[in-house]
Image (cartoon, helix red, strand yellow):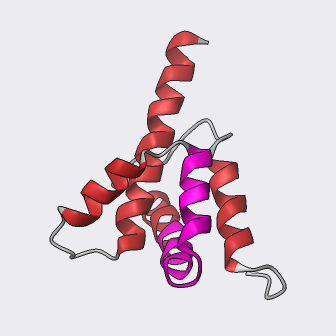
């Protein structure tokens, strides 16, 4: 990771790149775990430093804020909040990919 680029910029870049990929790795693959961990780490850092920016990024990626709240409130906390939110982001991106494949 480039030390001159903030975690916020890294997360924003990662989220925006997710918008344009054609394949999300399958849930049981090492690539999925790596993607999830990288995304979760940036989200956890944003939770501590700038929640408003995180909410703005989630809005841009089109993750429903109520789903985030429900997921965070209804989990047994075996995962970090970053991992929970990252899973929601990846799930939303998968929904978009399916929609594009079916309707475009």
Q: Main secondary structure of the magenta part?
A: helix
- At 84% from the left edge and 85% from the top edge, which residue is drawn? 4
Residue 29 picture location, percent across and down: 40, 56
Instruction: Specify the quadrant of the image occupied by residue 79.
Output: bottom left
- Which residue extends farthest bottom? 3
Q: From the top left corner, tell me how far across and down residue 72 is, in percent.
A: 28, 65
Residue 52: x percent and y percent? Answer: 57, 67
> Measured from the top left, where is residue 89 in percent x and y?
47, 51
Q: Can you tell which quarter of the image residue 101 is in?
A: top right
Residue at 66% x, 60% y is 14
Q: Is residue 83 above or below residue 7?
A: above
Seen from the viewer's position, the closer of residues 49 and 100 is: 49
Please state the extent of the stretch shown in magenta in the rendering.
38-61
Quarter the C terminus occupies: top right
Residue occupying image coordinates x 51% and y 77%? 41
Magenta-span inclusion, residue 92: no
């Amino acid at each position: 990771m480039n030390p001159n680029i903030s975690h916020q910029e890294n997360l924003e870049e990662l989220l925006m790149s997710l918008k344009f990929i054609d394949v999300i790795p399958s849930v049981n693959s090492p690539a999925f775990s790596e993607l999830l961990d990288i995304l979760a780490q940036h989200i956890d850092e944003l939770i501590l430093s700038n929640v408003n920016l995180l909410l703005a990024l989630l809005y841009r990626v089109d993750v429903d804020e109520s789903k985030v709240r429900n997921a965070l409130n209804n989990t047994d906390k075996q995962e970090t909040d970053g991992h929970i939110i990252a899973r929601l982001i990846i799930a939303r991106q998968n929904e978009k990919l399916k929609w594009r494949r079916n309707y475009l």
